[in-house]
Amino acid sequence: MMRRWDLAVDLRAALHLVGSLIKWFSVTFVLPLSYAIFAHEAWWPYLVPGVLALGGGWAVERAAFTERDIRPREGFLVVSLAWAIVAFVGAMPFVLLGVLPPLDAYFEAMSGFTTTGATVIAHVEGVPKALLLWRAFTQWLGGMGIIVLAVALLPKLGVGGSQLMDAEAPGPTLERLTPRIRETARLLWGIYVGLTACDVLMLVAIGKLSWFDAVAHAFTTLSTGGFSTRDAGFMTFSGAAQWITVLFMAIGGLNFALIYRVFARRHWRAFLLDTEVRFYGALLLGATLALWIIEGGGLEGLRHSAFQAVSIMTTTGYASADFERWAPAAKIILLVLMFLGGCAGSTAGSIKVIRTWLVFRFIVRETRNVIHPQAVLPIRVSGRVVSESIVRAVAIFAIVYVTTFALGSVLLLWDVTCAGLNVDVIEAASAVAATLGNVGPGFGIVGPMSTYAELPGTSKVLLIVLMWAGRLEIFPVLVLFVHSYWKG
Amino acid sequence: MRIIIVGAGEVGRSIAAALQTDHDVVVIEKDPDRLQLLQELDVLGVLGNGASLKTLKDAGAERADLAIASTDIDEVNIVACAAAKQLGAKITVARVQDAEYLQTWKRGYLGVDEMVCRELITSQAIADVIGLRGVRASDEFADGKILMTETVVEENSPLLGLRLRDAAIPNDCNVASIIRENAVIIPRGEDQILAHDRLVLIGTPQAVHEFNRRLSLSPAVKEVLIVGGGRIGFRLAQILQTRGLKPKLIELDEERSRWLAENLPNTLLFHGDGTDVELLEREGLFRCDVAVSVIGVDERNLLCGLLLKRMGVPQVIVRVEDPNFIAIFERVGIDIAINPRRLIAEEIISFTRGRIEKSLSLEQDRAEVLEIEVSPTSPLVGKKLAQAQLPPGVLIGAIVRGQHVIIPRGADVLRPGDHAIVFSTKEAAHQIEKLL
């Protein structure tokens, strides 16, 4: 006999784990705190949320103490809840410093952790530098994933960690590189840290950036986040810095497990034989070329085309030019790129290249099956057969993603029109695509040189939910709204 | 020779029958009824499990020159060989169904000296005759360096009526014999090629293929249809894939066809019935150059083969398990009927030949093709073939010296250690074996 409050989800175990995650998350405030002290800025706005997270997390962990391990079912709740709360805690410094009102602060923090890069701060150069560093740092943490970080570092998450990572990791496949999930998580973070360090050094040495700018931008480049410390974004920096950033954005959009296999084990050919990498490269080159032709060629034009194509497709969202003023054809290409994203297992958001490829192969296969009804045609990726259940899951994800996009666009358009703003369909659609895909800037009112600040509060709430769901690839969030998830 | 055969199934029995006259044969079988069937042969039957030491001892495995394990269970065959080897059997031969064991065995030893794999031998035999329209039988010698085929000259052959010396036979190919009516002729340059002759060709695979194509006007094969995706069908598709072909395969079982599609990247899989006329027509499957039916049921193979033949497939090859059906199948219109059991039995019997590496009987045992290693004491060593006194009814078709293949002419000389591929009539076979 089920009583009213009997849940199928082990709420206690989930809360226990979330409390523990938040408690440990407080440690991340050490970075902005020490920088604030170093730069003689206000430091208490980083200490207060840190202490609150530590105390609150500890309290929840103790109150919900249990010996039980979490199951996959709790995994969705833990991950979704953890991300929502982390963004809440991360928003506090913005409020405490008086930079943003609470809702805008939550929007900014969610945009940070989900590596979206959509901002509501119009004049970032007027903001304390420690806060800018914190803003970039949130993206860096969110890029590889806070759960992956927790699995790598926290002793507790050794066993149940793989379910959590599955719920958080971008893309349809999480490859285990080592028999132990913690080792895999550590390897991924190790590569991530190493690549970020490379980016910092190159930006300083070749791009002539200051150390502060280099670190903040490397944080948001490898994580394909897109926050900048400058009002004009990458237009401020040299061409060399832009080319370096093109390279590292493209790397951020690669499968980190593949990067490990290629470089650590010297499997150079694995890179060229990988279907996803080939398709990813072809799409980037094709988009660059198309933009270059539309925007009228030239060496500088090539740089801007490559920068925008890579930035939008990897869902980073930097701008080296105001693409708001580009030709409609170029803008449509950018809008399409927003849906592609990077590779599975990268820090990029959106649908992901491998899913696009699989859906394409699926369509080709079904068409061939109409002509040859009895032919048995498996779908292969990199020479290996993809099981039908994965193909189906991928097709369903694509449908859910596009449906979410369509619904979100309608809701947003309706809301902003009620608020009396003059927003056209493409602008609204771009805002939804840019937040759901964790890209950042869209067109028009939310264009690369504008902010999301003008949107009404209800629209911001909608976009916050979209960023959150988009980063976790919709399903971990979606199941929370299914009745049977909670009851039996 | 003292030979122990484990398992008196179809294969075991035919091996026993072939070896009974020249050797002491002991057969181990656990089924008394099957053992009863051996009464008509001149062999000793032992009741028991061939993988048990006690039974093997009872059968005298310590003194055995050759132990052949030929039950229907692969694992039993391997264990029986290992046990026999342990007891002191000189050479052990295991018959296996699953080619995976062949891979395992190549790396280790398992106490098995020779392993004979049914699916590989059968699929290789089918692959060897694919595209060779007149070919009735074919086999490889010297690890595939030499190919032998027995080819029927059809009435529309472009070489009809030509003398052999005018037929522009490729240099690396020898016409070892012409079988005409019931006569086995060792040919000379003046002999003509007549309709219904069967030519025994020995040479390098390329040259033999080339001459076969010219004999029967068959174009190079592009499309192959395989019906039945069992072990043999799967291996055959693999072999054809390595030749650069893209075969089509029809399999009845849905799960199996999915597995096949996943494991055969260059094969187009159809899930369906090989006798489904609608499927064959809609997909244009009957417009292939060669169709192979390797289902497990003889009657279905026949039906499927005849259907495809009627729909216009130029060459139809079917697998037939019942040896009594071979001749019938070929009479009613199947081009080539392949019997896996006979292939296996031949392969295993060849291990009893001592210095003879391999032998193949043609024309219901009236002629043979032998691969013999030339002994240093042979009186033929050092003599030009033109001067050597070969017994009548014998022709040296090819000589393999290390990696080199020599198609011998009168001036060539045999050296010790050469492998001679010899065509011989049944009567002359013992003589030439002694001579070499």
Image (cartoon, coloured by chain):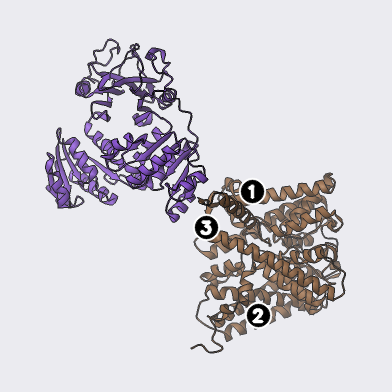
What is the chain identity of the residue bearing mark 3? A
Q: Which residue is mark 2?
A: A54
Subunit that carries the residue with mark 2:
A
Q: Position of residue B179 (x, y in %)?
A: 29, 22
A204 or A163: nearer the eye?
Answer: A163
Q: Residues within 10 Å of mark 1 (few under 14, many from 20)?
A: some
Mark 2 vs 3, N-terminal side = 2
Q: Which chain is purple?
A: B
Taking depth in this image into account, of B10 and B235 the one nearest to the observer is B10
Position of the C terminus of chain B, as image quadrant, is top left
The numbered mark at residue A278 is: 1
**Which residue was labeled with disc 3?**
A387
Q: Chain of mark 1?
A: A
Q: Which residue corresponds to the image point at 37% horizontal and 15% vertical from the top-left?
A: B164
Q: Which chain is brown?
A: A
Instruction: Using the numbered discs, state the Cα–Cα distance from disc 1 to disc 2 in whole angstroms.
Output: 45 Å
- Give x and y (percent) for residue B432: 22, 21
Q: Position of residue A119 (x, y in %)?
A: 80, 68
- Can you see residue B52? yes
Q: State the image quarter where residue A212 is shown.
A: bottom right
Q: Amino acid at mark 2?
A: Leu
Looking at the rendered structure, the kind of residue marked 3 is Ser
Q: Residue at x 34, y 29 (%)?
A: B142
Distance from the alpha carbon under mark 1 to that under mark 3: 21 Å
Disc 2 is placed on an element classified as helix
Residue A443 as seen in the image, left or right of residue B11: right
